[in-house]
Amino acid sequence: MLKPNKKAISNLPIAFLFPLFIAAKQTTQKQVNTIHLYKTYITYKKHMNLKRTFGTVLTVLGIIGLIWTGVEVINHKGDATTLIVVGVISVLFFSTGISLVRNTKDEA
C-alpha cells in the first residue's frame, strides 16, 4: 500500500484544502441560524452607534452655525439673506442631531 507523501500534501495550495476542512466539519442548521443572528445583532449595534455618532456631529455643526449666525447678527457684518439661510440650516442640523441622539437606543 502506498503512503501519502507529506511533502506533496504540504505544498498543496490552501484553496484546495479549504473545502476538505469544510466537509470535515458538519454544521447544523441551528448553528447556521445562530451565527446569522449573531452577525445581524453585531450589525445592528454598529448601525446604532453610527446613528448616535452622526447625530452628535449634526448637533455640533448646528451649534457652530448658530453661534456664527449670532455673532454676525450682533456685529452687523453679514448679508441678511446669508444669515437667514445659515441660521435655518443650523437650526435644522441642531434639531435633527438632537432627535437622532435622543431616539437612538443605547445598546452598549
Image (cartoon, rainbow, N blue to C red):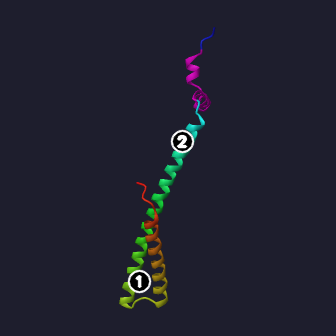
Q: What residue type is disc 1 on?
A: Thr
The disc at residue 69 is: 1
The disc at residue 34 is: 2
Q: Quadrant of the C terminus?
A: bottom left
Q: Nearer the viewer, residue 12 or 107?
A: 107
**Does the stretch in magenta take in 26?**
no
> In the rendered image, which quarter is residue 35 located in?
top right
The structure residue drawn at horizontal position 60% and vertical position 37%, both measured from the top left corner, is 29
The structure residue drawn at horizontal position 38% and vertical position 84%, both measured from the top left corner, is 70
Q: Compared with residue 92, is residue 9 higher up or lower down, i.e. above or below?
A: above
Q: Earlier in the sequence, mark 1 or mark 2?
A: 2
Q: Residues within 10 Å of mark 1 (few under 14, many from 20)?
A: many
> In the rendered image, which quarter is residue 2 located in?
top right
Q: Position of residue 28 (x, y in %)?
A: 59, 34
Q: Which residues are magenta?
A: 4-25
**Magenta segment, prevailing SS (helix, strand or loop):** helix
**Does the stretch in magenta take in 13?**
yes
Q: Position of residue 66 (x, y in %)?
A: 40, 80
Q: Position of residue 44 (x, y in %)?
A: 51, 54
Q: What residue type is disc 2 on?
A: Thr
The structure residue drawn at horizontal position 57% and vertical position 38%, both measured from the top left corner, is 30
Q: Are marks 1 and 2 in contact (CB under 8 Å)?
A: no
> In the rendered image, which quarter is residue 49 located in?
bottom left
Question: As drawn, which residue projects farthest toward the front?
Answer: 30
The disc at residue 90 is: none
Q: CA distance from mark 1 to mark 2?
A: 52 Å
Q: Position of residue 89 (x, y in %)?
A: 48, 79
Q: Quick one: SS at disc 1? A: helix
- Asked whether, in this view, residue 40 is left or right of residue 72, the answer is right
Q: Quadrant of the N terminus?
A: top right
Tag in front: 1 or 2: 2
Question: As drawn, which residue projects farthest toward the right?
Answer: 1
